[in-house]
């Protein structure tokens, strides 16, 4: 099945690049606070993508992610807390890895913190200066001259003027040639640098007035944001690679600046199909009450807090089922609860099928044929949903259809039909990056259920009802079936509400 992915640069769905090893780079977090649900949306999606490419399509994928561990925001937080920027970055990098682990995000081949690539960054800045794209503003830094790169704005479709009017995360300086020029190397300020040069001779790194500074022939300073990523990707992938991903907020100026830097360096041009990146992928925002969830707006829910109420599977399911990856996703508690309910229904059917298969001696002889049950090619529809620009909500709607049908036809189904349905559901969940685990029913509950069965057998229904209530109070529902009692944990909405209040 031909897989096509929407490329934000050309505005077209493109086939996957043919290559021995697909090189995927995704912009990592700026580590000055705990990751929130917006980060989770982007990183869950790319985790799914890498796993899909590897497991479903059998491709070899090198998934690279940077960590922005040097940035103004890190410095500001360190100053506020009276700490070293490196300690802030270290603390939140660790927190980020812990969160990713809890979310089952483990597809990244290599994490690359920017501070480990300072020589590569300096080297890129030096080459850009030599090629005439970089210029110095005394006592400030080295900047990229966007007027020298004629395609500036091609990804975000901004004219040079529009590009210039945007100031997000671009260091301001009155000495810039064009308003939209961005900093590649920021000089350390606030100290007598000549004196420092002498003091620190032989030293490569120091902290000057609370700001980290690396020594180079460019002078004491630190990298700009955009150059970190191109230095890292050039080091691992060379001047061209297959897929670059990130949230839609990064399109401009970050990704635009990356294109300018790397294409200026390599001389490769998009119009000759030699673009720096073959497919640009951008995830839509996760919103909170209509606004981008973000650290700076302070309207965020951390991954940690979310996981106090829901499981990691619920978050993954919510992300993949409720919106296409390019569309915005309006987060609310209701969305999470809905995802939890839906996932619960899916797992319940798997457990029920397993229960029925286990408790039916000599096979199930009912009459509904495999064809009658799964007459629709669920698997084919699921796959074609994903092949069309990773449309996970469309694919998951097929999963819902199979579950609905499975529940409706449950009693009438043949063994083969049940097995086929179960295998389709489990296979689909695995493709989406879930490792379906069935709940283990505690011995105490099983004992109560056995007692209740005895009462039912001797028609002591008031006693059996009392035990049903007790079992329910302990969080389990009992469904009496012709093959015995089927047990399932009650939907955790109550628990969630209790935690919230
Ligand atoms: P940052 O930590 O802000 O540098 O962001 C790291 C990654 O998370 C980038 O790819 C962002 O685009 C993405 N991201 C941050 N906030 C959101 C959000 N609310 N929705 C989707 N992606 C986000």
Image (tube, helix red, strand yellow):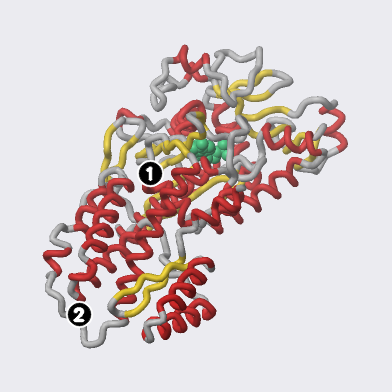
- Choose top left, top right, bottom left or bottom right for residue 301: top right
Q: How crowded is the residue under tag 2: few (<14 C-alpha within 10 Å), some, or many (20+)?
A: some
Q: Residue 326, image x and y in percent?
A: 37, 37
Q: Is residue 243 above or below residue 490?
A: above
User: Is the residue at mark 1 in contact range of ligand 1, meaning its CB lies under 8 Å from it?
Assistant: no
Q: Which residue is mark 2?
A: 364
Can residue 12 be seen here? The reply is yes
Q: Residue at x 39, y 57 (%)?
A: 343
55 relative to 239 in the view: left or right: left
Q: Residue at x 37, y 76 (%)?
A: 485
- Choose top left, top right, bottom left or bottom right for residue 279: top left
Q: Residue 353, image x and y in percent?
A: 30, 72
Q: Residue at x 72, y 44 (%)?
A: 88
Q: Which residue is mark 1?
A: 322
Q: Is residue 435 above or below residue 455?
A: above
Q: How crowded is the residue under tag 1: few (<14 C-alpha within 10 Å), some, or many (20+)?
A: many
46 relative to 425 in the view: left or right: right
Question: Of marks 2 and 1, which one's residue comes earlier in the chain?
Answer: 1
411 relative to 41 in the view: left or right: left
Closer to us: 91 or 68: 91
Closer to us: 278 or 354: 354
């Amino acid at each position: 099945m031909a897989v096509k992915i929407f490329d934000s640069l050309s505005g077209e769905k493109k086939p996957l690049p043919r290559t021995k090893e697909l090189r995927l780079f995704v912009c990592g977090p700026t580590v000055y606070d705990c990751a929130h649900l917006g980060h989770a949306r982007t990183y869950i999606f790319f985790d799914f993508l890498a796993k899909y490419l590897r497991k479903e399509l059998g491709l070899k994928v090198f998934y690279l992610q940077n960590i922005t561990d040097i940035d103004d925001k890190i410095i500001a937080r360190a100053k506020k807390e009276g700490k070293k920027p490196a300690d802030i970055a270290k603390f939140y990098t660790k927190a980020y890895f812990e969160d990713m682990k809890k979310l089952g995000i483990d597809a990244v081949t290599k994490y690359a913190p920017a501070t480990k690539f300072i020589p590569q960054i300096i080297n890129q800045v030096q080459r850009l200066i030599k090629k005439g794209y970089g210029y110095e503003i005394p006592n400030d830094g080295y900047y990229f001259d966007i007027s020298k790169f004629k395609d500036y704005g091609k990804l975000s479709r901004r004219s040079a003027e529009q590009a210039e009017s945007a100031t997000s995360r671009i260091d301001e300086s009155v000495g810039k040639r064009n308003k939209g020029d961005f900093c590649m190397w920021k000089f350390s300020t606030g100290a007598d640098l000549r004196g420092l040069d002498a003091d620190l001779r032989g030293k490569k790194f120091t902290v000057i007035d609370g700001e980290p500074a690396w020594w180079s022939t460019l002078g004491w300073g630190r990298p700009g944001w955009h150059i970190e990523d191109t230095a890292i990707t050039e080091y691992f992938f060379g001047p061209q690679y297959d897929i670059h991903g990130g949230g839609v907020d990064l399109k401009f100026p970050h990704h635009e600046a990356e294109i300018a830097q790397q294409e200026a360096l390599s001389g490769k041009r998009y119009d000759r199909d030699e673009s720096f990146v073959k497919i640009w992928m951008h995830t839509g925002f996760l919103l909170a009450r209509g606004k981008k969830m973000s650290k700076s707006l302070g309207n965020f829910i951390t991954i940690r807090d979310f996981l106090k109420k829901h499981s990691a599977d619920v978050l993954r399911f919510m992300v993949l089922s409720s919106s296409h990856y390019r569309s915005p996703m309006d987060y609310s508690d209701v969305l999470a609860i809905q995802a939890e309910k839906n996932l619960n229904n899916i797992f319940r059917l798997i457990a029920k099928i397993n229960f029925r298969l286990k408790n039916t001696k000599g096979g199930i002889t009912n009459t509904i044929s495999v064809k009658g049950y799964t007459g629709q090619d669920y698997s084919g529809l699921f796959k074609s949903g994903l092949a069309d620009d990773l449309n996970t909500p469309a694919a998951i709607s097929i999963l819902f259809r199979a579950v609905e049908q499975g529940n409706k036809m449950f009693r009438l189904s043949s063994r083969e039909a049940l097995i086929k349905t179960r295998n389709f559901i489990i296979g689909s969940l695995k493709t989406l990056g879930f490792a379906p685990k069935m709940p283990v029913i505690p011995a105490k509950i099983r004992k109560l259920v056995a007692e209740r069965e005895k009462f039912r057998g001797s028609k002591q229904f008031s006693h059996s009802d009392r035990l049903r209530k007790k079992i329910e109070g302990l969080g389990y529902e009992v469904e009496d079936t012709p093959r015995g009692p089927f047990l399932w944990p009650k939907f955790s909405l109550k628990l969630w509400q209790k935690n919230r209040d």
